Amino acid sequence: MRPGNMAGSATTGVQNPDDLNFLLIQGMITTGCAPTVDTNYCLDLTPVDYAAKAVVHLAVQAPQKAIGQRFHLQTPQKPVALIEIVQMLENVGYQLDAVTRDEFVERLAKDSRVEQLASGWPTFEPYFVASTWLQYG
């Protein structure tokens, strides 16, 4: 079974604090900015409880159908554009400056509270770019 990128629970919102989507959102809130000026990043979000239910169903209810097969456990929804996430955050009271990708990376580098995102950015960023084909393709 191949899970998609796990997001928090669709029921509780609880999220893995080491997940790249969580780190990006936390980094935007912490730095007060979002890289939306010259990017079209998207986040592919599969709720962890959705994937867990699928795994349990396949393992318990239909093991004869699952053995030897590949299953891609991914949300049927298109990835969410980062600008939409920013709008949701702003709707609940966060103020985020729209900045370029380079300005965002510079702010990450200067803020020790987001060191995990800053140090992983070269690895994380291609994922946000790659998800755009799912959104627009």
Image (cartoon, grey):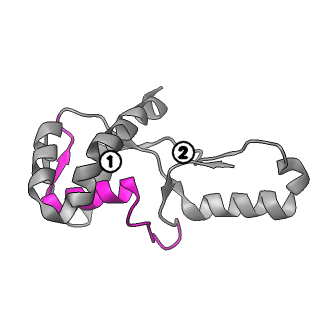
Amino acid type at mark 1: Glu
* Residue at x 27%, y 46% (from the top left corner): 121
What number of labels is visible?
2
Above or below for 117 versus 70? below
Q: Nearer the viewer, residue 136 or 53?
A: 53
Mark closest to the chain's N terminus, 2 or 1: 2
Tag of residue 77: 2
Q: Residues within 10 Å of mark 2 (few under 14, many from 20)?
A: few
The reply to whether residue 88 is in sight is no
* Residue at x 15%, y 52% (from the top left corner): 108
Per the image, is 12 magenta?
Answer: yes
Q: Nearer the viewer, residue 27 or 112?
A: 112
Amino acid type at mark 2: Gln
Residue sticking out furthest to the right:
64
Residue sticking out furthest to the front:
119
Give x and y (percent) for residue 112. Answer: 14, 63
- Name the quadrant containing residue 56: bottom right
Q: Dot 1 lies on which element?
A: helix
Per the image, is 4 magenta?
Answer: no
Q: Residues within 10 Å of mark 1 (few under 14, many from 20)?
A: few
- Would residue 125 be found to the left or right of residue 111 on screen? right
Give the Cα separation between the discs numbered 2 and 1: 14 Å
- Would residue 30 be found to the left or right of residue 72 on screen? left
Q: Dot 2 lies on which element?
A: loop
* Image: magenta residue range: 10-37
* Residue at x 45%, y 69% (from the top left corner): 13
* Residue at x 27%, y 62% (from the top left corner): 26
Above or below for 9 versus 51? below
Tag of residue 36: none
Query: What residue did someone put label 1 on?
Result: 84
Residue sticking out furthest to the top:
137
